[in-house]
């Protein structure tokens, strides 16, 4: 993104449609979100224009239609938003976030094995 910016709920939903499809005109993004959001196509077009101003999407033209595609990777957005969340809610302490998720039951017990594997792999990579 050109500027460090947190995506709002609707912006993130639009980006998810584009990440999933690779590219899409505004009308397809609108159709994908209409049942859940019930927004006008003009609202989606406005948000796509704003996302383009922020450097999140790019477009090409197909006749008179703009075809939008992501200009940023989902992983980069996720990393930035999680980092901001950790900073805002846990004072930058990512272990506090993990502790919260485990203790509050937000992490399914079945997922704990997968987390243990990830931690083990990461420790090996770091030589610990």
Image: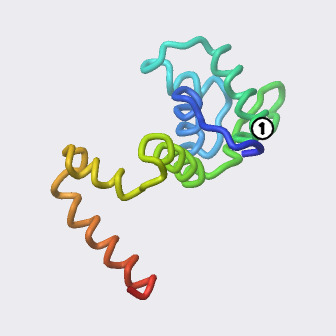
Dot 1 alpha-carbon crowd within 10 angstroms: few under 14, some 14 to 19, many 20 or more? some
Residue 65 versus residue 113: which sits nearer the camera? 113
Residue 65 versus residue 68: which sits nearer the camera? 68
The quarter holding residue 69 reads top right
85 sits to left or right of 27: left
103 sits to left or right of 36: left
Q: Quadrant of the N terminus?
A: top right
Q: What colour scheme does the image use?
A: rainbow
User: Residue 55: where, in percent of width, then height?
Assistant: 75, 41
- The vertical placement of 103 against 13, above or below, is below
- The vertical placement of 108 against 36, above or below, is below
Looking at this view, name the residue that lies furthest to the left. 109
User: Residue 74: where, in percent of width, then height?
Assistant: 56, 50
Looking at this view, name the residue that lies furthest to the front. 91
Residue 74 versus residue 85: which sits nearer the camera? 85
**Residue drawn at (59%, 28%), measured in percent from left and top?**
28
**Residue drawn at (63%, 23%), measured in percent from left and top?**
27
45 sits to left or right of 28: right
Q: Secondary structure at mark 1?
A: strand
Residue 91 versus residue 107: which sits nearer the camera? 91
**Residue drawn at (52%, 50%), measured in percent from left and top?**
83
In this figure, which residue is indicated by the disc labeled 1? 59
- The vertical placement of 9 against 40, above or below, is below
- The vertical placement of 20 against 65, above or below, is below
The quarter holding residue 19 reads top right
Q: Quadrant of the C terminus?
A: bottom left
* Count of numbered circles in the view: 1
**Residue drawn at (60%, 40%), measured in percent from left and top?**
18
């Amino acid at each position: 993104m050109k500027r460090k910016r947190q995506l709002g709920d609707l912006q993130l939903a639009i980006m998810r449609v584009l990440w999933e499809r690779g590219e899409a005109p505004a009308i397809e993004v609108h159709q994908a979100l209409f049942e859940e959001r019930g927004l006008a196509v003009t609202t989606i077009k406005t948000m796509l224009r704003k996302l383009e101003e922020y450097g999140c999407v790019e477009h090409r033209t197909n006749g008179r239609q703009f075809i939008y595609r992501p200009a940023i990777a989902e992983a980069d957005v996720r990393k930035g938003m999680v980092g901001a969340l950790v900073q805002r809610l846990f004072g930058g302490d990512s272990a506090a976030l993990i502790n919260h998720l485990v203790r509050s039951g937000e992490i399914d017990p079945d997922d704990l094995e997968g987390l243990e594997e990830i931690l083990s792999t990461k420790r090996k990579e770091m030589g610990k």
